[in-house]
Image (cartoon, grey):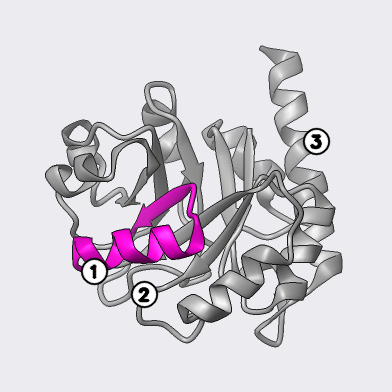
Amino acid sequence: MLVKICGLLRPEDAEAAAAAGAGMLGVIFAPAWRRRTVAEAQQIFDAAPAGPERVGVFVDAPLPEVEEVARACNLDRIQLGGSENPDYCDALGPRAVKTLRLPRDAAIVADFDVDLFHFDTAHDTRAGGTGESWDYASARSLTREHPVLLAGGLTPDNVATAIAAARPFGVDVASGVETDRVKDPDKIEAFVRRARAAFAAQEAAA
């Protein structure tokens, strides 16, 4: 199981996420208020100890730009949150994580051959980070067949319920562990702890 803390803005955010036991640290390179420069991202990632995977989030960026950032930041995963097609994902190999929005994109999941999917809230104008929840149980038929990071409106209060409903491979959170748009170490700790407990309960019941 994986727990990803995304939208990290400061080195101390990465420190808090790693200390809490997060397995993935996400920095956004797409146009958004949480967007970081390469230099800022390097400082954020370097603040965490070795272990958690480094994830960069992009939306319809030119492939050479993505590859350049990935090299500069030593990214382990490249999350693609736009209209990137299967060929684009294939070019990035096993690092590619494709974001799809349910239920809108359920029919195209089979078009992609990626090691990890990222399922988020469907929204007409925003690529992600809406903080809006959705019917997580609707992903269950897909999580049986594919490794999925579940996202969209998750918080320390609902992450266990979401895991029980969707049974994903992992979970992803950004705004759900913030207070006044700043990562909150207490919320990060609670989110990771409750997610891990829910995954443990799921495995015990299997």
Residue corresponding to mark 2:
30
Element type at mark 2: loop
The front one of 152 and 165 is 152
User: Looking at the image, do the residues carrying marks 2 and 1 touch, with CB atoms under 8 Å apart?
Assistant: yes
Question: Would residue 14 be found to the left or right of residue 97 on screen?
Answer: right
Q: Mark 2, mark 3: which one is toward the viewer? A: 2
Can you tell which quarter of the image residue 169 is in?
top right
Q: Which class describes the residues within 10 Å of circle 2: few (<14), some (14-19), or many (20+)? A: many
Quick one: label 2 or label 3, which is nearer the N terminus? 2
In space, the residues marked 2 and 3 are separated at their CA atoms by 32 Å
Does residue 89 show up? yes
Can you tell which quarter of the image residue 110 is in?
top left
Q: Residue at x 57, y 70 (%)?
A: 42
Element type at mark 1: loop
* Residue 104 point in image, percent of width and height: 24, 52
Q: Quadrant of the N terminus?
A: top right
Q: Quadrant of the C terminus?
A: top right
State yes or no: residue 69 in magenta.
yes
Q: Residue at x 21, y 60 (%)?
A: 63
In space, the residues marked 2 and 1 are separated at their CA atoms by 8 Å
State yes or no: residue 181 in magenta.
no
Q: Amino acid at mark 1?
A: Ala
Residue corresponding to mark 1:
61
* Residue 152 point in image, percent of width and height: 50, 59
Specify start and end residues of the magenta stretch as a single range. Answer: 62-80
Residue corresponding to mark 3:
197
Question: Would residue 23 be found to the left or right of residue 55 on screen?
Answer: right
Quick one: label 2 or label 1, which is nearer the N terminus? 2
Q: Which class describes the residues within 10 Å of circle 3: few (<14), some (14-19), or many (20+)? A: few
Q: Residue at x 43, y 22 (%)?
A: 144
